[in-house]
Image (tube, rainbow, N blue to C red):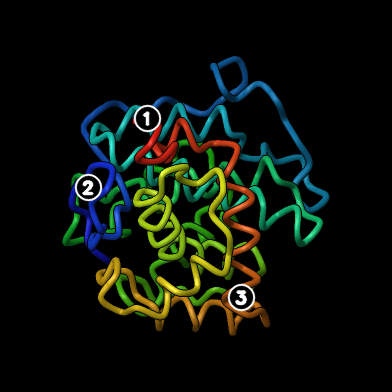
């Protein structure tokens, strides 16, 4: 869901909501000994390998070629890391889910999430991890309803990070000094980053039992350390 045109350059008022990714490439097999799959963690008390950030990058970056889609993956990953910290959950795991969430979009934009479950299951993801990824398209391209805080957070921050990035891109210091009050002014302006679905974001925040400004504050702080990698250093630091 959403618009996936390339990110505008510094100083441009972003109207797109950059998201999602998939490209050609072979899916690496998930098994002990392969790069990115050496740390085996307990998931809900079972000896099942938990998706790591290293493994998520291995899978996603083998499939995604568009730079703006990789930026979106990192944006969502950073926001998810911060949301995990807020809820007292595993930040590395949530960040990995966020990085991999748009696995099939680049190749199948009109069939997004229809080419996700089988290959990611074959790649070693658990049912819980695949379900979380599918749930972010709820009501748009998926019928998997977000029910856990992980799923609700991913559903919400997917669109939210697009507006945060658009706000930061217009500022002299980019994301470095972006405050939630400035974000909220742009959030209320429906003409700004118009392709980002405000109602979806509000719905996700309602699922979480949180205000938009509070979720945005968490995501901004989570994304701030990655400002340079996200191309959000600002118009004065181009």
Which is closer to the viewer, label 3 or label 1?
1
Rendered location of residue 88, percent (x, y) = 81, 56
- 58, above or below 194, in the image: above
* Distance between mark 1 and mark 2 Cα atoms: 22 Å
**For this view, does 83 lie left or right of residue 108?**
right
Residue denoted by label 3: 147
Residue at left offset 57%, top offset 76%: 212
Label 1 secondary element: helix
- Inspect this view and state whether residue 121 appears: no
> How dense is the environment of label 3, judged by Cα within 10 Å: few (below 14), some, or many (20 and up)?
few
Q: Earlier in the sequence, mark 3 or mark 1?
A: 1
Which is closer to the viewer, label 1 or label 2?
2
Viewer-side residue, 44 vs 61: 61
Residue denoted by label 2: 8
Residue at left offset 78%, top offset 47%: 46
* Distance between mark 3 and mark 1 Cα atoms: 28 Å
Q: Earlier in the sequence, mark 1 or mark 2?
A: 2
- Inspect this view and state whether residue 201 appears: yes
Residue denoted by label 1: 61
Label 2 secondary element: loop
């Amino acid at each position: 869901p959403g618009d996936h045109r390339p990110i505008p350059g510094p100083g441009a008022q972003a109207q797109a909501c950059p998201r999602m990714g998939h490209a050609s490439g072979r899916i690496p097999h998930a098994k002990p000994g392969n790069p990115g799959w050496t740390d085996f963690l307990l998931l809900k008390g079972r000896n099942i390998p938990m998706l790591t950030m290293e493994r998520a990058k291995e899978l996603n970056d083998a499939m995604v070629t568009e730079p703006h889609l990789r930026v979106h993956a990192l944006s969502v990953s950073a926001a998810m890391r911060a949301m995990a910290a807020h809820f007292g959950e595993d930040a590395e795991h949530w960040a990995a889910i966020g990085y991999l969430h748009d696995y099939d979009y680049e190749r199948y934009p009109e069939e997004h999430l229809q080419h996700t479950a089988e290959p990611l299951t074959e790649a070693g993801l658990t049912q819980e991890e695949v379900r979380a990824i599918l749930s972010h398209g709820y009501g748009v391209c998926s019928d998997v309803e977000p029910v856990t805080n992980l799923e609700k957070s991913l559903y919400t921050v997917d669109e939210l990070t697009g507006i945060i990035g658009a706000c930061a891109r217009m500022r002299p210091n980019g994301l470095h000094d972006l405050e939630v009050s400035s974000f909220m002014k742009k959030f209320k302006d429906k003409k700004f980053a118009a392709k980002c679905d405000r109602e979806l974001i509000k719905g996700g925040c309602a699922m979480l039992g949180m205000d938009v400004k509070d979720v945005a504050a968490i995501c901004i702080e989570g994304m701030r350390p990655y400002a340079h990698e996200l191309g959000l250093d600002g118009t004065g630091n181009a």
